Amino acid sequence: MTVRAILDTKGHQIMSLEPEAKLSAAVKILGERKIGAVLVMSAGRIEGILSERDIVRVLSERGALVLDESVSAVMTRKVVSCKQSDTVGAIMEMMTLGKFRHLPVLDGDRVVGLISIGDVVKWRVREYEQEQEALREYIKTA
């Protein structure tokens, strides 16, 4: 299975902020939308990604005053991405080895989605359930 299959089921919505946005605005968006990360984009290009981990880390280091700083001061600048043609197994390995939970999906230079580890787990569970059902049906007809 490929990343495209997950996006076709999940959707291609992308939540993003400008690098100049306040960290407090990003926290509000993450909370309201119940998401764990937001892309930081400028003129359609990924500048970074801001995750809950980034926020917790900087709050523990510098305190609540950091909420008035820009997202660009806190975001992860080195963003790993994938393509729609990548396999679910390949992105699982990327996420595990890189110790991150969100992966932007690119088509050339254009962002077409964002996959989370939760999306991958949900997909894999559904895949296993379908396999089990197919085996049950096979056994019934044998």
Image (cartoon, rainbow, N blue to C red):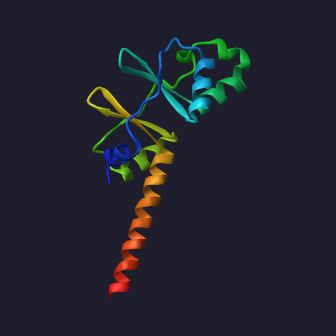
Q: On the rendered structure, is 60 left or right of 116?
A: right
Q: Is residue 54 above or below residue 87?
A: above
**Residue drawn at (43%, 65%) of the image:** 128
Q: Residue furthest bottom?
A: 142
**Residue drawn at (41%, 72%) of the image:** 133
Instruction: Tell me residue 138's x, y (percent).
Output: 34, 80
| Image quarter (top left, top right, bottom left or bottom right) of the N terminus | bottom left
Give 83 or 134, whichever is nearer the viewer.
134
Instruction: Tell me residue 32's x, y (percent).
Output: 60, 30
Q: Quadrant of residue 21?
A: top right
**Residue drawn at (36%, 20%) of the image:** 45
Give 7 or 116, whichever is nearer the viewer.
7
**Residue drawn at (46%, 28%) of the image:** 15
Q: Quadrant of residue 53?
A: top right
Any part of residue 96 in sight: no
Count the labels in the image. Answer: 0
Give 12 or 76, whichever is nearer the viewer.
12
Instruction: Tell me residue 50's x, y (percent).
Output: 53, 27
Instruction: Tell me residue 80's x, y (percent).
Output: 41, 33
Any part of residue 44 in sight: yes
| Image quarter (top left, top right, bottom left or bottom right) of the C terminus | bottom left
Q: On the rendered structure, is 95 left or right of 44?
A: right
Q: Quadrant of residue 30?
A: top right
